[in-house]
Amino acid sequence: MTTAHLSAADRADVLLEALPWLQHFNGRLVVVKYGGNAMTSEPLKRAFAADMVLLKTLGASPVVVHGGGPQINAMLSRAGLKPEFRSGYRVTTPEVMEVARMVLFGQVGRELVGLINEHGPFAVGTTGEDGGLLTARRRTVDVDGEATDIGLVGDVTRVDPAPLTDLLAAGRIPVISTVAPGEDGEILNVNADAAAGALARALNADRLVVLTDVEGLYADWPDRSSLISRLTVGELEELLPGLASGMIPKMTACLEAVSSGVSAAHVIDGRVPHAVVLELLTHGGIGTMVLPASGDAPGPAAPAGFAGPGPELRTNH
């Protein structure tokens, strides 16, 4: 995406459209869950890193949370470790957890830190283990009415934001790998969507942004014309039980974050270059925005006559 074809006046208009949003996000904290194709395409990785630096340079405080499912699977395959399943659920054995821990922090996190720091000394990699940032409880799943152990997988039970507030105060962009100690000290793999939501709540973030591999939330998937531009937490609660399994943790994270005081949450298409900037710094946005029960969208109003995308017209975000 370039502006080479635009006249100087058109480029000025682009900047001026963003001005109210630049003012809105100055001094505010934004938690971004980095995942999907944005993690596997080199141009998209670089575009995402540039977006984080742009937000930081313009006065916002981005916090990045990432998983690494595709990279973990690739490493497991290279190591000859075959996945184990119980009643359809993948089991995280100690051997798998060792690989996951290495890949999340040593590969995915380090790569993103490096891409961000090509623009200046902004990013610092960390994990849920560091400084007691996250604490988790081992998860079991219900299979035919019985609690079934699926290994070293956990749900976040506590967040201590102090390690991040220190980094943010120093002007850094935290890049967080989602492994966390359990209450008995064992290290657990935590769903990155859920971790991002928990961090957004604990940090009193202004926004939670979740990157995925679809345009947003659809009212009638796979009908692409049914993309929902905005909905309230109450409307999302009604839709949640019928969503595809892959969307449930993402939308649950959004629901819980906004219900707990985050101004708005966004699910956006990470396949689009600079998706975060397009969603946060333009009036139209590109994805689905989850709003409080009141339906009031935070931030400046859109210009008169502005028409947003999707079946539910977005007039501001």
Image (cartoon, rainbow, N blue to C red):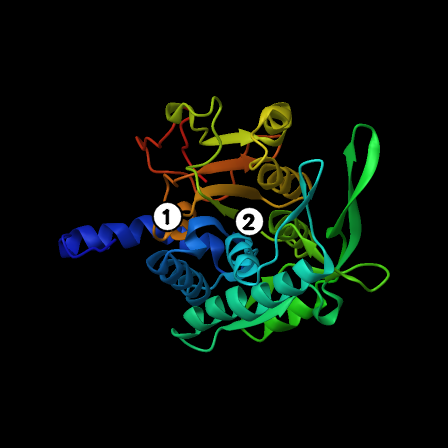
Depicted 285 relative to depicted 23: above or below: above
Q: In this view, does 183 lie to the left or right of 28?
A: right
Most foreground residue, 253 or 91: 91
Q: In this view, does 115 lie to the left or right of 176?
A: left
What residue is drawn where x is 65% and y is 66%?
127
SS at mark 1? helix
Depicted 227 relative to depicted 11: above or below: above
Q: What residue type is labelled 1?
A: Leu
Name the quadrant containing residue 257: top right
What residue is drawn where x is 64% and y is 27%?
237
Q: Where is residue 45 in the image (x, y as percent from the top left)?
A: 40, 60
Q: What residue type is labelled 2?
A: Arg
Q: How crowded is mark 1: few (under 14 residues within 10 Å), some or many (20 or more)?
A: some
Q: In this view, does 118 lie to the left or right of 148?
A: left
Looking at marks 2 and 1 on the same chain, the residue that comes earlier in the sequence is marked by 2
Give the numbered dot on residue 69. Answer: none
Q: Is residue 203 left or right of residue 312?
A: right
* Residue linked to disc 1: 278
Q: Where is residue 33 in the image (x, y as percent from the top left)?
A: 54, 52
Q: How crowded is mark 2: few (under 14 residues within 10 Å), some or many (20 or more)?
A: many
